[in-house]
Amino acid sequence: MHKFFSPKSIAVIGASYDSKKVGHIVVSNLLKQGYGGRLFLVNPKGGRLFDHKVYKSFSEIKHSVDLVVFAVSSDLVIKLLPEIVRSGVKNFVIYAAGFKEVGDLQKEQVIKDLSEKNSLLILGPNCIGFVNTVDKINLTFLKGRVKSGNIGMVSQSGAIGSWLVDYFADHYNLGFSYFISVGNQTVIDTAKSLRFLADDIKTKVIACYLEGVVDGGEFRSALSYAVTKKPVIILKSGKTEKGAEAVSSHTGSLVGSDSVFQALFDQLGVIRAESLSEFLFLLKLFSYERQPKSENLMVITNGGGVGVLLTDDLISEGVNLVYLSKETVHKLKTGFNLKRVSIHNPLDILGTANADDFKLAIESGLLDSSVGAVVVLLTPQANTEIVQTARVVVKQQKKSNVPILPIFLGGKSVDKSLDLFEKHKIVGLSDFSCLPSSLKKVFNWQRCLKKDYSLLLKNLIQTESYKTIKIDFKQDNCLSKALGFLLKNNFPVLDFAVVSNEKQLVSAMKKLSAPYVIKADLESSLHKTDKQAVRVAVDSKDLVEAFYDLKNKGFERLVLQSFCKGAEFFIGLKQDPNFGVVLALGLGGVYVETLKSFISLVHPFDFFDFKRALKSAEFYNILSGQRGLVKTDLFSLYNLISRITKLVVDNNVKELDLNPVIFQKDKFFIADARFVFK
Amino acid sequence: MHKFFSPKSIAVIGASYDSKKVGHIVVSNLLKQGYGGRLFLVNPKGGRLFDHKVYKSFSEIKHSVDLVVFAVSSDLVIKLLPEIVRSGVKNFVIYAAGFKEVGDLQKEQVIKDLSEKNSLLILGPNCIGFVNTVDKINLTFLKGRVKSGNIGMVSQSGAIGSWLVDYFADHYNLGFSYFISVGNQTVIDTAKSLRFLADDIKTKVIACYLEGVVDGGEFRSALSYAVTKKPVIILKSGKTEKGAEAVSSHTGSLVGSDSVFQALFDQLGVIRAESLSEFLFLLKLFSYERQPKSENLMVITNGGGVGVLLTDDLISEGVNLVYLSKETVHKLKTGFNLKRVSIHNPLDILGTANADDFKLAIESGLLDSSVGAVVVLLTPQANTEIVQTARVVVKQQKKSNVPILPIFLGGKSVDKSLDLFEKHKIVGLSDFSCLPSSLKKVFNWQRCLKKDYSLLLKNLIQTESYKTIKIDFKQDNCLSKALGFLLKNNFPVLDFAVVSNEKQLVSAMKKLSAPYVIKADLESSLHKTDKQAVRVAVDSKDLVEAFYDLKNKGFERLVLQSFCKGAEFFIGLKQDPNFGVVLALGLGGVYVETLKSFISLVHPFDFFDFKRALKSAEFYNILSGQRGLVKTDLFSLYNLISRITKLVVDNNVKELDLNPVIFQKDKFFIADARFVFK
């Protein structure tokens, strides 16, 4: 991959005299960027272009070529590629659209086959190429020169790249190490690019725009590797059905379930930006290495109202405003010498505050060891010293490694200050809309880095080690067999009895406590409520009638259980087309479909993934509220879902629904199970 | 109020020679704004300032003064005010802080009393004054001249005003008609200001920054009036507890429950901005009168990836992308003459699109009668004609009253285009983060304007007219009396029986179907589960035991009901300190506290308020999913909550909790009632 992105010689097939054509722009960009290697231009017309000889065909080039760039149509690519491959070239960039993304799978396959047979590396098709600012290579048709920096980006969209290049152009200390447009991901895909960027020393932060993956396993593996090396920020589209539709006509990707991607990102510690402004803010934050030192913020403002608004937004996202230390409060009170400045956080230093007032407040905040970052929220008022305050921020930042995040609200009057911040690698904002949600993501990422596995190991030793269990009822996949199997293997199944006649019923009634649930012992893959095959909370005196009622409906064998009061949950597992077995745990009963309140975990997951996901769920209070789901209980629930997951993985079960799983006091009881085999 | 804001003569007490002091800046601002009336400056030092004579005291002024402005400390205000009032002046602006907001209620009261006795109008204290651009009056200490425009703003924060003034300064066709800083709202409050702005003909849109209200009834009434006159956009803080705390130290307001404010805004058709960027976008949209003609958008983009991201965001907010008409699709296919341009919405016209391509797409969209607004999403790519495309937008917009919303992503390369849009009163953006949520709010507002009361009346005639019912069990407020009272008055109460001995129990068992719920007939204001006074789903053979178990716990009288399966809801009513009776309807049982999934309605509300709120609730599917909550059922539920609300209002009940209210098939059954009287 390194050789691919750092070619010493490049041939452009389709170099064009027409300044609007890709074959012209690419060559122009390459030269503008300052490429120092050998460049060969190919066009049947011949002649000279950009002071370079134009070869009439590739075969005329008598030098070795590291990389061949196709700036021609898809048909011509298919025609020319095999011959050039025969000449020994291994690396290619193909811009042309007209492959998988428009439904032409055959053309796509031609490229794929050639690549596999000849160990080629190909970027594209349907891409805008790549930029390597380290070696001054710009093989894209982005507008103009690309600024160099420490952001390494892989993107399924050229437009996102063009937006960033355009934005970086007028900003300071922001730029790409590499920009890789993967297009249809036919050979070089997002996963390969992530690995490359993870190993690249110039790249401090990885940015990724993602629509869909080619090989889920490879993607996960590459991402897992990358996150150990540097922060990875992903902007992913296709959240909604309509969005997924649009993705498919854009790069021909199959999107898969967005919630599974989200679960994976959370497990791996990937930071997912949810808007362009979040993406930009996070890239800046990591590019400038200004992550907060802890989750406790101090907010300083000269505008009471905006301070309150920001506080609301921060608290809503679960971001803490720290209680300032006694020393800090004292320092501020003495310093301001004004009783009417209330020492709260947010600290309102009033509309009359000048640069010195800001200095006093910022300095005190930076020295308070409990403060992880200082947010300076300024609005331009009559006496506000905008630029002087910006200079105070810069000066203070130089003295401290606790980051200052200045938000200067206003129009052009704050532009100069924002420029100043960038020149000193300080992350400034002119609007705080994206700040709270972005910081929350940074804090989640920091927590993810801090997983304490010693705690996990200590506790896991206490839980039984998981055996591989072979499912033995695939031929007779009815409810009672499924429950019996789970029970036999020590899963917490609610007591049940199979009843076919009145004698069995009477005997089962004695064993189980009333009232009852009675249901048909159907093929377990069916949904029982659809068939009106369940009676819930049946009184003992009505049970015989309910029994015969179901018998008369044609259900020969029935399952009897006690009616168990408690919160209903569900545990569902299925095979995700991208990432294998995915588990969902959430509110059951009528709430499954309507509230969609659940957590997702992608196998394999660990205790910390589970704990983090559970604690972020809105239904967590139900589990912790009644009896207090203490540490051991979290482990026992984790134990349950881990074993269920292993069962599904080991037996390659297509789908498994445990619904309801009843939570009573502090225990779970599986009341129903639906297995679907392949 | 008109005279207050348009004084022909003004006296400034505390006019200062020190250019940093409020008493200097205010005079300077007034003159800069071009005030044409008489101006009297007062300062014990005397002399001349801004080419005006400085009076040593107010009493020296021998002309009549319409408005007196205090630019002195709170102590001096209290000292000087009575004398000036005696001279006959009725209108005052007081900037000084140091009143209610720092806990000095006595000083606040002095002003209030003086005002009431002498029918004064006072703006402030703790405010930054007001601007009336119509009469060129700027009595604030905002930075510089304030641009005139059609936005009328009332604000509890000066900083929000200063931010907007600063922003407007460098933008085109944006400005204030009035800006009113109400501070502590001692006399002139938000309500009075809203009424004034509602009647003002220069004001096309009302902007409001709100922290808390003085008189909820008056506020509601003023807001109800204002929304019938023009769009009202409110930015409200104090959403979170920490935010509310900050509010109280800022303007001394009591915030009250944010969800009640939200309910009121929704009922009245107030547009609530939830961030500064939403606020700005909405102000622009209404100031330029570019509201979408319908809820169906068309998105045109030259950047596939960003198009997908925007689509995701729009769909997530419930904003529709319209299916283009056959004619439009045909027109686009013919026009582009390219099979590979897929005619979807979002319409991806590819990175190579030039200004003519945009023109073709925009023109087709504007002519499609199903399109309510055209979003043009541009990213600067190699061949993108940025400014030319902006000109296309301007030209097309002139020919159509369907608004175009251009989003030009990028850095400074798009600035010129954004300027051009503003000059032609087109709402342009350089980032679409705030667009989807803002449009959703505009659509909700449009729906609110379109309430079809004829439908309501037709159906209401079928429902019984509500009688006033007097509560007769306040002295014996136990559960059975409460349920009995509700039953007697035709509320849908679940059948129950009061049982004190075994004979009554056996007789009740026969009447009610098993299994049962048995609970203590406690004082209704108590929470029963706290006292372990309830047994749920008790089988008939276990009932006697449960009965004696409760008796032995000391509960003399018990209530027996059938155990009723179904989704559990709650209906709760309480007296809000600001707005009177507020109703909540949501998921009951263990989910009340944990999921907090409920709708709020402020009395009085109508059927449309109820329907809108219900349909926006996530639990709505539970109601509509099982049997389909059709039109008549919505009316019957509305009927139920209206009657309950009337009962609470008529009897001034402090709190009423109906929980659970069980939803079975398509009917509601009140299973428990908790009345709290004052």
Image (cartoon, coloured by chain):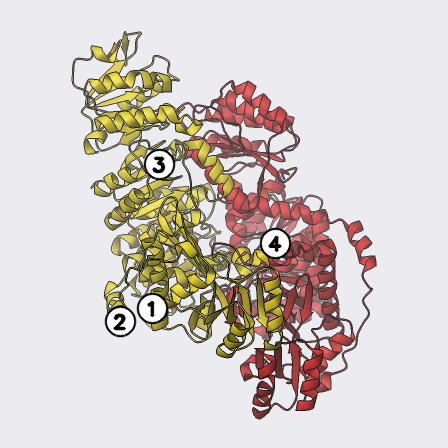
Chain colours: A yellow, B red
Q: Amino acid at mark 1?
A: Phe
- Of residues B536 and B440, the one drawn nearer to the viewer in this rendering: B536
- CA separation, marks 2 and 3? 45 Å
Bin the neighbour count of mark 2 within 10 Å (Cα to Cα): few under 14, some 14-19, many 20 and up: few
Q: Amino acid at mark 4?
A: Ser
Chain to which the residue tagged by mark 2 belongs: A
The disc at residue B413 is: none
Question: In the figure, residue B322 lies in which quadrant?
Answer: top right
Determine if marks 4 and 2 fall on one subunit.
Answer: no
- CA separation, marks 1 and 2? 10 Å
- Mark 1 and 2 residues: CB-CB less than 8 Å, in contact? yes
Return the residue at label 1: A635
- CA separation, marks 3 and 1? 39 Å
Of callouts 2 and 3, which one flags the residue occurring earlier in the amino acid sequence?
Answer: 3
3 vs 1, front mark: 1
Chain to which the residue tagged by mark 1 belongs: A
